[in-house]
Amino acid sequence: APAAAVYRAFTGVGGKRGWPAFDWAWRARGLMDRLVGGVGRRRGRRDPDELRVGEALDFWRVEAVEENRLLRLRAEMKVPGRAWLQFEVKPEEQGHSTLTQTAYFASRGLSGLLYWYALYPIHGLIFGRMPRQLAKLAEQGST
């Protein structure tokens, strides 16, 4: 799909639309976060299609937005460290593009390492399926 369609797909995540892969797991994570005093997913998003730097997106904060290129989210959920989720699209030849999704985690101590590796299997499933689902959404949106 063209880069603009891919960008619309990944900037449309969260809120009432949910997440394109394992939305039930994102809801469960939001519930767990609320149980330990975090923000959970109760904040949703301001607008279903537009994102601005500094605004809330479920339990994330929009840290960077570059139109038709990049979205970086910083986690505000309770985690033993700091976490980001980034989506980047690069245009290729003939109206195609490449989507790169990167999850960053800067652990805080042993508890952070244990957290990351304990959740590694579910992260692998979620973060493995999400780019494929975003690609499908982008392809549907570009036709």
Image (cartoon, rainbow, N blue to C red):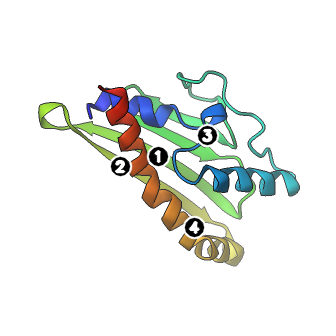
- Distance CA(mark 3)–CA(mark 2): 20 Å
Q: Secondary structure at mark 2?
A: strand
Compare marks 3 and 2 and give the one earlier in the sequence: 3
Q: Is residue 62 above or below residue 111?
A: above
Q: Secondary structure at mark 4?
A: helix
Residue 122, label in figure: 4
What residue lies at 58% left-to-right and 35% top-to-bottom? 62
> Does residue 48 appear left or right of residue 140 in this picture?
right
**Crowd band around label 3 with a 10 angstrom C-alpha radius: few (<14), some (14–19), many (20+):** some
Viewer-side residue, 141 vs 50: 141
Compare marks 1 and 3 and give the one earlier in the sequence: 3
What residue lies at 52% left-to-right and 45% top-to-bottom? 20
The residue that label 2 is drawn on is 100
The residue that label 3 is drawn on is 18
> Does residue 44 appear left or right of residue 105 in this picture?
right
Compare marks 4 and 1 and give the one earlier in the sequence: 1
Q: Secondary structure at mark 1?
A: strand
Viewer-side residue, 80 vs 101: 101
**Crowd band around label 1 with a 10 angstrom C-alpha radius: few (<14), some (14–19), many (20+):** some
- Distance CA(mark 1)–CA(mark 3): 17 Å
Q: Are marks 4 and 2 in contact (CB under 8 Å)?
A: no
Q: Nearer the viewer, mark 4 or mark 1?
A: 4
- Amino acid type, callout 4: Ile
Q: Nearer the viewer, mark 1 or mark 3?
A: 3
- Amino acid type, callout 2: Thr
The residue that label 1 is drawn on is 86
Compare marks 4 and 3 and give the one earlier in the sequence: 3
Q: Secondary structure at mark 3?
A: loop
**Crowd band around label 2 with a 10 angstrom C-alpha radius: few (<14), some (14–19), many (20+):** few
